[in-house]
Image (cartoon, rainbow, N blue to C red):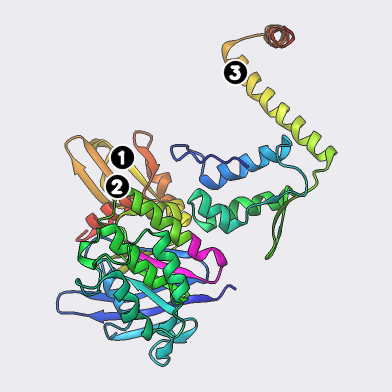
């Protein structure tokens, strides 16, 4: 598992750990049932405080990505396909909202946005 | 598991020119606490009181849930590293074990030898020929070889190069990995603490300025900067440790008072250093 801590980032360190593990799970780089390093192992490896890694793991556990078994370790949970899809769609909607905001500032029409999107898709196909 | 390995209540000790005043804090088992403050803030006094190298005037010090004064054998479970080596300069490293080990019931020769190897300490070297980093590692090797559950370090990183400091952080995080061991270390090199400490206690002139989760400190305080013309009496009463000069001012601010500031000022996250510098300016305010 790859985790890179950016000290210069505005994002708090526990958040950085949380989102990188989440991405790895969602993208399938870590699989269901796989054993993650323990809270204290991870804190030693990343040279961050135990409280920081605890916070990241607790958030992951609360959202159902991992399961912390006392004395055994942390396992990646089975992700419900429907929940996953819903999360990704939510993600897309959030991004579209952002795009809509930018477009409003630049006074771009809906058609112009579709134009940009189709150019991106064409680039993919080439 | 939520038990405190170290609990200090209303600790007071008065000297002719300094008073450690009503200091209370606690360290939960399995975590690292940093004790910070400028030189003379009371860090070493606090540590010496915990170890009973000084006699307290008032207060309670409990280690492993018991009063240390009534249970002298508790000291077997405490390990200490000071900033200066306390071994005889002419000893070889191999002499150290012979001299120190009889004091500890749980001394483990095997562990000690392993640490010497791990830290690359040559057994035939004399103490006086060791570099600062090596002396610190030797003291750590001794401290970690009698299965202590509480490790206390007084300024362990001062005078160490960045590589040795990084190694020390690694050793400390490894030490607490089993959830039973805890670390209290004092320092004024705050970048080390920024990384690995779970809890912080900030001492200022013998008083506690803050004690608690490290993250809570940064959620509670921020730094405000602005031009001198932004300041007025109403605003200044919310600011702590104001530093003024011809180009502007900077001060410490409790986050809950942020609403009283105006848009011309810059607000940014505080570092431990920022906080230490500004509380130093608070005196006499």
**Chain at tag 2:** B
Is disc 2 placed on a helix, strand or loop? strand
Q: Nearer the viewer, residue B112 or A113?
A: B112
CB under 8 Å between discs 3 and 1: no
The x, y position of residue B114, in whole percent, is 45, 66
Whether labels 3 and 2 belong to a single chain: the reply is no
For residue A40, side relative to residue A88 (left or right): left
User: Which residue carries the number 1 mark?
Assistant: B225
User: Which residue carries the number 3 mark?
Assistant: A102
Q: Nearer the viewer, residue B55 or B159?
A: B159
Seen in the picture, residue A60 relative to B63 is either above or below; the reply is above
**Chain at tag 3:** A
- Structural crowding at the residue carrying mark 2, measured as other residues with C-alpha within 10 Å and reported as few (<14), some (14–19) or many (≥20): many
Determine the CA span between mark 2 and mark 1: 7 Å
User: Which residue carries the number 2 mark?
Assistant: B251
> Which quarter of the rendering shows the C terminus of chain B?
bottom left
**Chain at tag 1:** B
The x, y position of residue B168, in whole percent, is 39, 58
Whether labels 3 and 1 belong to a single chain: the reply is no
Name the outermost residue toward the bottom.
Answer: B70
Determine the CA span between mark 3 and mark 1: 31 Å
> Which quarter of the rendering shows the N terminus of chain B?
bottom right
Is disc 3 placed on a helix, strand or loop? helix
The x, y position of residue B271, in whole percent, is 36, 48
Residue positioned 26% across, 70% down in the render: B92
- Structural crowding at the residue carrying mark 1, measured as other residues with C-alpha within 10 Å and reported as few (<14), some (14–19) or many (≥20): some
CB under 8 Å between discs 2 and 1: yes
Q: Which mark is residue A57?
A: none
Q: Which residues are magenta?
A: B174-187
The x, y position of residue B88, in whole percent, is 21, 75
């Amino acid at each position: 598992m790859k985790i890179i801590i950016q000290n210069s980032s505005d994002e708090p360190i526990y958040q950085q750990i949380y989102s990188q593990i989440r991405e790895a799970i969602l993208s399938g780089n870590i699989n269901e049932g796989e054993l993650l390093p323990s809270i204290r192992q991870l804190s030693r490896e990343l040279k961050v405080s135990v409280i920081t890694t605890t916070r990241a793991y607790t958030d992951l556990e609360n959202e159902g990505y991992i399961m912390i078994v006392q004395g055994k370790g942390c396992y990646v949970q089975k992700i419900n396909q429907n929940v996953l899809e819903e999360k990704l769609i939510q993600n897309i909607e959030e991004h579209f909202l952002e795009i809509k905001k930018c477009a409003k500032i630049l006074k771009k029409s809906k058609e112009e946005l579709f134009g940009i999107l189709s150019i991106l898709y064409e680039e993919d196909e080439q | 598991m939520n038990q405190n390995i170290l609990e200090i209540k209303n600790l007071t000790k008065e000297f002719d020119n300094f008073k450690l005043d009503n200091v209370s804090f606690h360290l939960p088992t399995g975590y690292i606490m940093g004790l910070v403050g400028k030189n003379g803030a009371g860090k070493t006094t606090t540590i010496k009181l915990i170890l009973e190298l000084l006699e307290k005037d008032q207060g309670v010090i409990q280690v492993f849930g018991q009063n240390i004064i009534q249970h002298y054998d508790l000291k077997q479970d405490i390990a200490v590293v000071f900033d200066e080596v306390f071994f005889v300069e002419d000893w070889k490293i191999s002499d150290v074990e012979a001299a120190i080990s009889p004091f500890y019931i749980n001394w483990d020769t095997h562990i000690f030898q392993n640490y010497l190897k791990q830290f690359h300490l040559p057994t035939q070297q004399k103490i006086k020929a060791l570099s600062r980093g090596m002396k610190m590692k030797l003291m750590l090797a001794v401290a970690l070889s009698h299965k202590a559950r509480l490790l206390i370090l007084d300024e362990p990183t001062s005078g160490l190069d960045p590589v040795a400091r990084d190694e020390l952080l690694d050793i400390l995080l490894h030490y607490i990995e089993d959830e039973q061991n805890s670390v209290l270390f004092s320092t004024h090199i705050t970048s080390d603490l920024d990384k690995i400490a779970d809890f912080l206690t900030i001492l200022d002139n013998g008083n506690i300025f803050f004690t608690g989760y490290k993250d809570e400190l940064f959620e509670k305080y921020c730094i405000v900067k602005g031009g001198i013309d932004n300041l007025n009496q109403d605003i200044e009463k919310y600011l702590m440790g104001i530093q003024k000069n011809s180009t502007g001012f900077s001060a410490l601010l409790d986050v809950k008072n942020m609403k009283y500031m105006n848009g011309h000022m810059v607000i940014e996250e505080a570092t431990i250093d920022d906080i230490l510098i500004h509380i130093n300016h608070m005196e006499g305010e």
